[in-house]
Image (tube, rainbow, N blue to C red):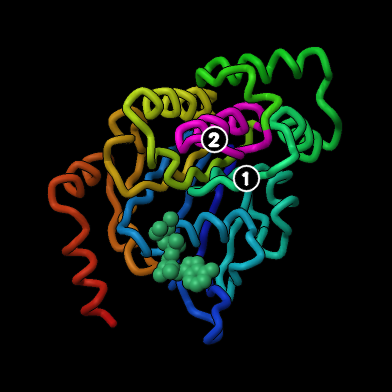
Amino acid sequence: MSTLEIRDLHVSVKTEDGPKEILKGVDLTINSGETHAIMGPNGSGKSTLAYSIAGHPKYEITSGEVLLDGENIVDMTADQRARAGLFLAMQYPVEVPGVSVSNFLRSAKTAIDGEAPKLRTWAKDVKEAMNRVRMDPDFASRSVNEGFSGGEKKRHEIVQLELLNPKFAVLDETDSGLDVDALRIVSEGVNRFTEQGDRGVMLITHYTRILRYIKPDHVHVFVAGRIADQGGAELADRLEAEGYDSYVQAAKAQV
Ligand code: ADP
Ligand code: MG
Ligand code: MG
């Protein structure tokens, strides 16, 4: 069993006016086998949480810990964290002109495993992973994310997830901008990943519609840099009906 434990995490970003605190004490534990939905309004710090876990250099962890199987990873680089078993699907996947999808996936796999994947089985694995998310095989030779539609970028994230097979996946709005068919395909990919049983998912979203396809074990309401409430899947239904407004007002009243 694996655990990803976030303890009293405070994170600032560098701005022209100096550091600005975005995360104001986040506590969250994900065990392997669990899917946690993080839901909250725009600007509440969900992506900041995702980047901070993955090790983006722009986000400074000013206090608190992120423990992967008991080991504090906050001083590790993003590469080291990926090798330790963390994966981030970014809300806005970056374009990498001049690097083909096929080379990108192979480099990522090599970096994480510490050795190149076996050529023959690898080509087959990539083809099958792309096929499962209905990505045309022609994408293998295209530059990473360049000119991809929103849905194509998100399918490519799922291909990475399946091939890299981390312990914990942080999926930042992997549902945004998807039509119904793409949403189902992407959700099925996430479900295949979790069905292995010993994997954990942090699913960041502000819509409940993806939760029709992916059943979270826990739902956390994220507002103003903190977890404001938590519950089971039924909490998502309540958010669908009532929105985040009462939480946002309560957070404002606290300041
Ligand atoms: P969410 O993903 O919940 O929409 P974000 O984590 O993207 O929220 O942003 C949280 C807050 O932090 C926002 O007010 C945003 O403007 C601010 N923020 C995030 N990154 C930066 C940055 N690099 N520079 C300045 N402000 C930032
Ligand atoms: Mg946002
Ligand atoms: Mg975001």
Q: Position of residue 152 (x, y in %)?
A: 51, 31
User: What residue is drawn where x is 47% and y is 30%?
Assistant: 190
Q: Which mark is residue 110?
A: none
- For this orientation, the residue located farthest to the right is 115
Q: Give left or right: position of 33 versus 180.
A: right
Picture layout, residue 54 above or below residue 127: below
- CB contact under 8 Å: marks 2 and 1: yes
First in sequence: mark 2 vs mark 1: 1
- For this orientation, the residue located farthest to the bottom is 17
Q: Give left or right: position of 188 versus 87.
A: left
Q: Which residue is identified by label 2?
A: 148
User: What residue is drawn where x is 83% and y is 18%?
Assistant: 119
Majority SS type along the magenta span: helix
Q: Which residue is identified by label 1?
A: 95
- The magenta segment is 143-164
Q: Is residue 146 magenta?
A: yes
Cα separation, mark 2 vs mark 1, equals: 9 Å
Tell me which amino acid carries mark 2: Phe
- Quadrant housing residue 100: top right
Q: Position of residue 212 (x, y in %)?
A: 28, 30
